[in-house]
Image (cartoon, grey):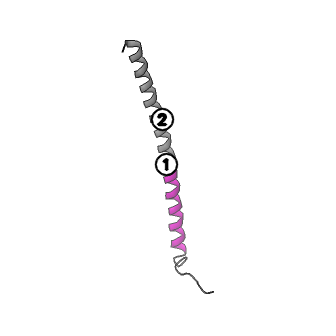
Amino acid sequence: MDIPELSMALSASKLQSDWGTAVLSKNLDALQEVGDTISEMMDVSALERSVNPNLGGTIDVRL
């Protein structure tokens, strides 16, 4: 393998690595947002239970 081919192969490898890192970063950002939203939803649910502790405690199954 000569120098130009080696240089092109290394450049392509670096590009692939950089692209993979960028995609992973975007995915991590999206997952962080989802986690924050779920956490916020859980806090709202806990607040509702503190105001209405009996809410959802029983189910009326009469037909």
Is-magenta flag for residue 7? no
Q: Which amino acid does label 2 sit on?
A: Ala
Q: Which stretch is magenta?
A: 32-51
| Residue drawn at the location 43% of the way across and 31% of the way down | 17
Category of crowding for the residue at label 1, using alpha-carbon neighbours closer than 10 angstroms: few (below 14), some (14–19), many (at least 20): few
Considering every residue shown, the one lying at the far bottom of the view is: 62
* Secondary structure under the numbered disc 1 in the rendered image: helix
Report x, y in % for residue 32: 48, 48
Q: Which mark is residue 46?
A: none
Q: Which amino acid does label 1 sit on?
A: Leu
Which type of secondary structure does the marked residue at label 2 adopt? helix
- Looking at the image, tell me whether mark 1 or mark 2 is earlier in sequence order: 2
Specify few, some or many for label 2: CA neighbours under 10 Å numbering under 14, 14-19, or 20 or more. few
Residue with the most extreme left position: 1
The residue sitting at the right extreme is 63
Number of numbered callouts drawn = 2
Query: Where 48 sits versus 37, above or below?
Result: below
Residue on which disc 2 sits? 22
Task: State the residue lying farthest toward the front.
Answer: 1
Q: Name the residue under label 1.
A: 31
What is the quadrant of the N terminus in the image?
A: top left
Label the magenta part by its dominant secondary structure: helix
20 versus 5 height, above or below: below
40 vs 2, nearest the viewer: 2
